[in-house]
Image (spheres, rainbow, N blue to C red):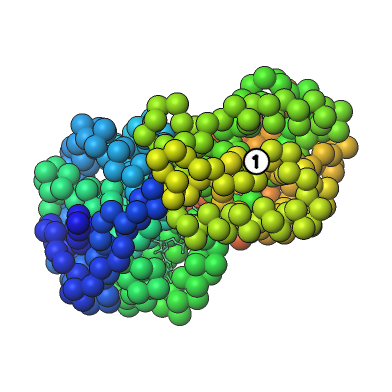
Amino acid sequence: MKKILNYIDGTYQDPTSGEWLDNFNPSTGNIYSQIAKSTPKDIEHAYVAAKEAFPSWSTTPIETRSKIMLRIADLIEANLDRLAAAESLDNGKPVSLAKAVDIPRASANFRFFGNAITQFASEAHESVGRNTMNFTLRQPIGVVGCISPWNLPLYLFTWKVAPAIAAGNCVVAKPSEVTPMTAYLLGELLSEAGLPKGVLNIVHGTGPEAGQAIVAHPNIKAISFTGGTTTGEHIARTAAPMFKKLSLELGGKNPNLIFADCNYEKMLSVTVKSSFANQGQICLCGSRIYVEESIAETFKKDFVAKVSELKVGNPSDNDTNLGALVSQAHMEKVENYIEIAKNEGGTVLFGGNKVSVPGHEQGYYLQPTVIEIDDNKCRIQQEEVFGPVVTIVSFKDETEAIQMANDVQYGLSATVWTQDLNRTMRVSKQLEAGIVWVNTWLNRDLRTPFGGVKNSGVGREGGFEALRFFTEPKNVCITYTDLPNNP
Ligand SMILES: NC(=O)C1=CN([C@@H]2O[C@H](COP(=O)(O)OP(=O)(O)OC[C@H]3O[C@@H](n4cnc5c(N)ncnc54)[C@H](O)[C@@H]3O)[C@@H](O)[C@H]2O)C=CC1
Ligand SMILES: O=C(O)/C=C/C=C(\O)C(=O)O
C-alpha cells in the first residue's frame, strides 16, 4: 500500500516510530494508503534541518528565492491533473472542483508570494531637527511552524508555507492527517524546483502528537494555523508562555444577508455556491441565510428548487456538484447537527439524509440540507457545522438583520445582497467580521487582508500582512553630527 513519508532535509523519510496511520478514501470508505505517524523526534529532525538551512536561505537574494518559488508554481500547474485527482481521492471533493479551484490556487499562492517578496519594503522615519534617522529592518524570524486543515488541503498548506519561505524563513509544516496526500506529493516538486534542502520540511502525523510538538517546540518562534476554534484555543494556550507569534485562522458561522432589492437571480445562484461549495466545508461558507420578510417565501421556494438540482455523487464524475464529506466521524458530526436542529424546532425544507452512491455505498455522502428556523439563539445558529447544511431565518428590517448576524461568537466573513449603496456602507461597517462580500462571495484578491474577529481567530493572512507576520521588524536608529559651521 502507498506510504506517505515525511519530507525532511530534502529527502523522503520513514517516521522514526516505524508506525503508520490509516488513510481513508472518503468516496468509498476504504483505506488506501498509510501515513507516517510522526513523533516529537521527527519534529526535532525537521527543526534541525530547518535551522541548518536558515543562514543560507535567509541571505539568498530575493530574486533567487522568487525564481525558485515561481518554478514551484509552474510545476504545480504542470501537475494539475495528477494533483487534482490525488486531492479528490484524499478529501472526497469533486475532481472538477480540485482542478478548477484547489490546485490552481496552490500554484497561485507560490506565484503570488514569489512576486510579492520582490515588492515588499520597509519604512524609514526621519526625526527632523534631531539629526536622527530611523529605518526598520524586516528580518525573517528563523524556523516557523505551519499547520493546515483538511478542507482545502494543498490550497491552505501553500497559503501558509509560501509567504513563510518567501520572507526567508525555514519551515516545519504539518498538513492534516486526514488529507496528507498532496502535501506529500509537493515534496517531489520542491526538489525538482531546486528549493534548497531543509527550507521546507513536511512532517505528517496527528495533531495532538506531531502538531503539538511543533507548537510546543521552544525554538519554533511563530505558528501559522488554520483549523477548528477549539484547537486554536489549545494552540494559543501552549504558545502564549513562550511569547510566540501566532496567526490563527479559525472557524466561522457566516451570515448571508439578503435584502429585497438585490439582483435576485445572481443572489440565488451564488447563494447555492456559498452554502454548499466543497460540501459546505469552507470556513467562509454562508451557513446562516437571513432573508428580508417580503421576499422570504419566494426565496425559500426558489432556493430549494435550485438545491434539489444539485447532484451528490462520485467525485470523479464531471457532473457531480457535491462529493463525499471528508470522514465518517465528520459525517456523523454533521448528521448529529441536523438532528439537533430538528429537536430545536427547525423544519427541514430539503435534504437531511445520507445518499447512497451506486458502487460507492460505504462513502460519506450527505444531501445538501436546508433548514428553516426562527430562534437565532439555538445551537444550529450558533455552532459551526462545517458541512452541507444551511439555515434560513427571515428578518423585518436592516437593524434586525445586523443584530442577528452579529449575535454569534464567530466573526470571519459575511455576505450582503443589496443594490443600495448607502445600505452597503452602513451594513458593512456594522458587521462584526474580518471580510464582507457585497453582491459576491469568495471573490479573492490575494493582496487583501484575510482573517477573522472574535472566535474566528487572530491576525491576518494575505498580501503584505502575511509577509509582515513572517518577519520581525527591527528599528535601527542613527544619529549624526553636523559639521561645526553648518546650520
Ligand atoms: N478552516 C476551518 O475553519 C476549519 C475548521 N474546522 C472545524 O474544526 C472541526 C474539527 O476538525 P479537525 O479536523 O479536528 O480540525 P483541527 O483543528 O483539529 O485540525 C486542523 C489541523 O490542526 C492539527 N492539530 C490538531 N490538534 C493539534 C494540536 N494540539 N496542536 C497542533 N496542531 C493540532 C491537525 O492535525 C490539523 O493539521 C471541524 O468539524 C470544523 O468545524 C476544521 C478544519 C478547518
Ligand atoms: O484564502 C482563501 O481564499 C480561503 C481560505 C479558506 C479557509 O481558510 C478555510 O476554509 O479554512
Q: Is residue 83 above or below residue 200?
A: above
Question: Which of the 4 image quadrants contains residue 270?
Answer: top right
Q: Is residue 254 above or below residue 131?
A: above
In x, y percent, where is residue 300?
76, 31
In x, y percent, where is residue 377?
79, 57
Callout 1 amino acid: Gly
- Using the image as rendered, state which of residue 178 and residue 294 is in the foreground: 178
Q: Which residue position holds label 1? A: 351
Q: Quadrant of the N terminus?
A: bottom left
- Using the image as rendered, state which of residue 345 and residue 245 is in the foreground: 345
Residue 82 in sight in this render: yes
Q: Is mark 1 within 8 Å of ligand 1?
A: no
- Using the image as rendered, state which of residue 206 and residue 439 is in the foreground: 206
In x, y percent, where is residue 125?
42, 51
Q: Residue at x 49, y 32 (%)?
A: 321
Is residue 7 shown left or right of residue 445? left
- Using the image as rendered, state which of residue 388 and residue 47 is in the foreground: 388
Residue 201 in sight in this render: no
Q: Residue at x 77, y 58 (%)?
A: 343
Q: Residue at x 55, y 58 (%)?
A: 332
Q: Residue at x 47, y 57 (%)?
A: 328
In x, y percent, where is residue 76?
24, 37
Is disc 1 placed on a helix, strand or loop? loop
Is residue 232 shown left or right of residue 37? right
